[in-house]
Amino acid sequence: MNKIHYFYDPMCGWCYGATTLISALNNFAAENNWQVVMHPGGMIGRRPMENGFRQHILSADEHIASLTEAEFGENYRARVASSQPLILDSMLPTQAILAAKTCGKDEFTMLKAIQSAHYQQGLDVSEEATLQQIAKDLGIADSDWQNAMQDAAAQLRYELQHSHQQMSQLGVQGFPTLIMETDKGLQRLPHSQFYGKPADWQNYLNKLSD
């Protein structure tokens, strides 16, 4: 089976900006019996953001929005710009994505829900209660969620180690990165050329199956 390897991080603004492209990629994969394999990056260990880095985030978000047409919500921007504590954490949201998969939900669906909560609604996705509510909105019962999160906590380290090994082998240095695997070998997909150009991206994907 042909595969697309998606190296991502839930706290990566460029991954949020690429959501439209990744959604189209997932649809393409489903229609052509390809597999999208998601590899979490563990970009940010849980920590508070200093004021200087907050300004960097806001500036980077403006650049991402201008290129990708992704929308960063007012609540999100206000939260980043405020004087209130801002905790960012890649680990717990990644654990939640693994837990959602255990509960039979698509990993990318959970990632999009987390990105929407963070980048649009300005919710604190470094808190378990926020992630549990997102899971509930996707139809996952609280009891199932708690068990899945416990299992995912043990799985998280292995998943990150495996991702980092593959990143090292493939020369992946940032997120998002897309690598196609077929019987012809490996090929990096130039997704960044198609930011803000969803029709051109769809045409590019269609040619991959020729």
Image: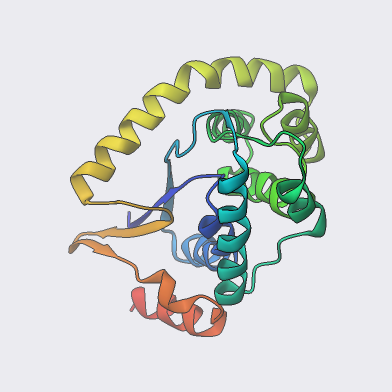
Q: Look at the picture and state if 184 lies above or below 79.
A: below
Picture quarter with the N terminus = bottom left
Q: How many numbered tags mark residues here?
A: 0
Q: Relative to residue 72, is residue 43 drawn left or right?
A: left
Residue pictured at 52% horizontal, 50% vertical: 12
Q: Is residue 149 left or right of residue 14?
A: right
Residue at 79%, 52% (x, y): give it. 78
Left or right of residue 80: residue 61: left
Image quarter hosting the C terminus: bottom left
Q: Is 113 located above or below residue 196 in the figure? A: above
Which residue is at the front of the view, 202 or 83? Answer: 83
Q: In x, y percent, where is residue 162?
A: 32, 32
How far from the left and from the top, in percent, is residue 82? 77, 46
Residue at the image point whose x is 26% and y is 41% from the top: 166
Please state which of residues 24 and 67 is positioned toward the viewer in this rendering.
67
Residue 143: x %, y % from top left: 76, 17
Color theme of the render: rainbow
Identify the residue at horizontal 72%, vertical 52% (top origin).
Answer: 116
Residue 41: percent from the left, percent from the top?
Answer: 42, 40
Q: Is residue 90 above or below residue 118?
A: above
Place residue 110 in its image quadrant: top right
